[in-house]
Structures are given as C-alpha cells and as structure tokens.
Image (spheres, rainbow, N blue to C red):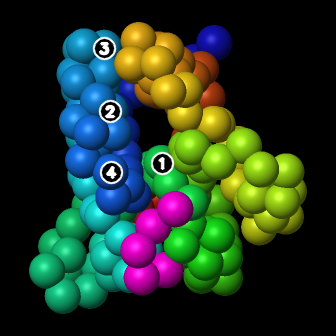
Amino acid sequence: MTENARPIEMLLVEDNEADIRLTQIALKQAKLANSLNVVRDGEEALSYLKAEGEYAGRTRPDLVLLDLNLPKLNGAEVLKEIREMDEFKSLPVVILTTSDADQDIFKSYELHANCYITKPVDLRKFMGVVEMIEDFWVRVVTLPPSDSEEE
C-alpha cells in the first residue's frame, strides 16, 4: 500500500446538489487534506480541464469523479474528450453515477474510464462509497505526478 506524499486535487462533475453535498461531507469526514472542486455540467468540466475562462488559474486535477447524467454534454461525451487530449490520457476518471445500465457501463470502459461505480440510493451507503473511493485513490494507488512534479 502506498501513501501519497501530497494532497490530491479532485474534480467532481455533478449536477445533483444533494450528491455534491454528500460527497463534500464524506470527504471532509475522512479528514484528509485533499481538495475537491465542483463543476455542474459537461461543458464546465471541459473548460475546467482546459483551464479556460474563469478556470484559467485552476490547479490540474489528479482525479475526476464524473457523473454520466449531466446537462449540456453528458459524462460519456466528457470522458471521450478527456481521453482525446494528450495531457489527460493518464488522468484517472471514476464514473460515479446512478445508472446501472449495461450499455452505460460498457461505453464507459470502452472510453477508458478507470472504474465505474453505481451510486447507492441509501445515504449511508453513498457516503461509504465516497469514502472508499477516496481511500483507494489517495491511500492505495500511486497517481501520476502533477504538472509541477513533472518538471
């Protein structure tokens, strides 16, 4: 097991306010010094990743939590664009969605999602899933170095 030496930057792409709040609460309870940035639609997610407009000074995310059911561009479209950008081919993307449809699961992996998680409807289980995601991606996995570490 590895312990990341630095806090990680997470980008949550989610339009459901309740799910955003629950994710924030679950991550805060873990008491790790990670940063969670939130965008609420697919177009905003791509602007954030490309550091465009209001996101010009943003820190590059180390991990993306991506819902599939988004306004403007859906999660599959966002994931496809992420994987087409050279600088984000190695960016871990976790699909975190309510859909358990086989075609959504297949499509997500076809587009090179790192994992696919169906959101539980039970509040306690949902928070447990978010905590497990953070535990795995922060404490277990070694993430690619951030932009500043590559230099």
Give the residue at mark 4: 16
Q: Nearer the viewer, residue 99 or 91?
A: 99
- N-terminal label among 4 and 2: 4
Q: Residues within 10 Å of mark 4 (few under 14, many from 20)?
A: few
Alpha carbons under labels 2 and 1: distance apart: 10 Å
Please give the name of the residue rendered at 55% of the width and 34% of the height, measured from the top-left corner: 119
Q: Where in the figure is residue 33, as x and y percent of width and height?
A: 23, 26
Residue type indicated by callout 1: Leu
Please give the name of the residue rendered at 50% of the width and 54% of the height, measured from the top-left corner: 66
Please give the name of the residue rendered at 64% of the width and 60% of the height, measured from the top-left corner: 90
Give the residue at mark 1: 65
- Find residue 108 and report its image quarter: bottom right
Q: Quadrant of the C terminus?
A: bottom left
Give the residue at mark 2: 23
Q: Where in the figure is residue 59, as x and y percent of width and height?
A: 26, 61
Q: Are marks 4 and 2 in contact (CB under 8 Å)?
A: no
- N-terminal label among 2 and 1: 2
Q: Is residue 91 depicted above or below 75 in this figure?
A: above
The answer to whether residue 22 is seen in the rendering is yes
Residue type indicated by callout 4: Asn
Q: Which mark is residue 30?
A: 3
| Label 3 element class | loop
Left or right? Give the position of 58 relative to 65. left
Q: What segment carries the magenta color?
A: 69-73
- N-terminal label among 3 and 4: 4
Q: Is residue 111 depicted above or below 86 in this figure?
A: above
Q: Is residue 45 depicted above or below 2 in this figure?
A: below
Residue type indicated by callout 2: Thr
Alpha carbons under labels 3 and 4: distance apart: 22 Å
Q: Are marks 2 and 3 in contact (CB under 8 Å)?
A: no
